Amino acid sequence: MTKNVLDEKTPPKIEEIKIEEDFHTKYMRERKEKADNFPKKAERFKKKLKELKVKSFSVEYSGSGDSGEIHEISYEPKKLNASIDVGTWKRWNNNTFESEETTDHKPLRDYIEDFCYDLLADNHGGWEINEGQSGNIEWNSKDDVINHNYTQFIEQSYDEGF
């Protein structure tokens, strides 16, 4: 809890006063930090895919009305049965309908899906809100570039008088 400096008999020194960020300033700062750090996250992700001998992947997603989801995930080679040691992570339990922590290796499909959700959250906050956004995220080992093609849906209103 922040102390009310007006209640004190001896006012604090300027360096002792903690100025709290307002919500918007904090949100924008954190969003910028995530976007600035994302290229390093992407490089680690691509490196791991190459180590696993993944040749390419493609993801399709859409969001609007305050919800969004990844619809399709495909990768080559299709029969690659890889998993990644990511330490402790949370996965959804379809029996209890709750997330649970696990140290199991993460399946490749989940690894790609989680990265794509991070890409959207870190670089396109709000992709699932209101009219939303849809797109696809693709990568191949030859070009080694993650391509994100998307469409943002924006509602516009007009008022004309004649």
Image (spheres, rainbow, N blue to C red):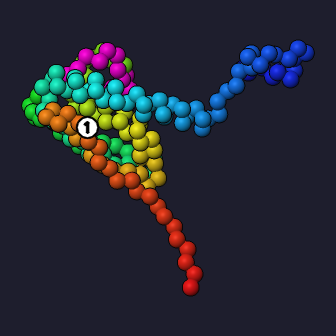
Image position of 108 (left or right of 11):
left
Foreground pick, 117 / 45: 45
Instruction: Please state the horizontal and vertical placement of residue 131, each as a whole percent of the image.
Output: 43, 55
Q: Quadrant of the C terminus?
A: bottom right
Q: Is residue 28 visible?
A: yes
The magenta stretch spans residue 69: no
Image position of 153 (left or right of 108):
right
Which of the 4 image quarters holds residue 110? top left
Crowd rating for badge 1 (residues with CA inside 10 Å; few <14, some 14–19, many 20+): some
Write the residue at 37% across / 39% down.
Answer: 120
> Which stretch appears magenta?
83-100
The magenta stretch spans residue 96: yes
Foreground pick, 118 / 28: 28
Image position of 123 (left or right of 26):
left
Write the residue at 34% across / 16% down.
Answer: 88
Write the residue at 52% across / 71% down.
Answer: 158
Which of the 4 image quarters holds residue 97? top left
Q: In the image, is residue 132 above or below residue 59?
A: below
- Outermost bottom residue: 162
Q: Is residue 94 visible?
A: no
Foreground pick, 158 / 14: 14
Q: Quadrant of the N terminus?
A: top right
Instruction: Please state the horizontal and vertical placement of residue 13, each as a whole percent of the image.
Output: 80, 15
Instruction: Please state the horizontal and vertical placement of residue 62, each as a whole percent of the image.
Output: 33, 48
- Residue type, label 1: Ile
Q: Which residue is mark 1?
A: 146
Tag 1 secondary structure = loop
Write the residue at 38% across / 45% down.
Answer: 68
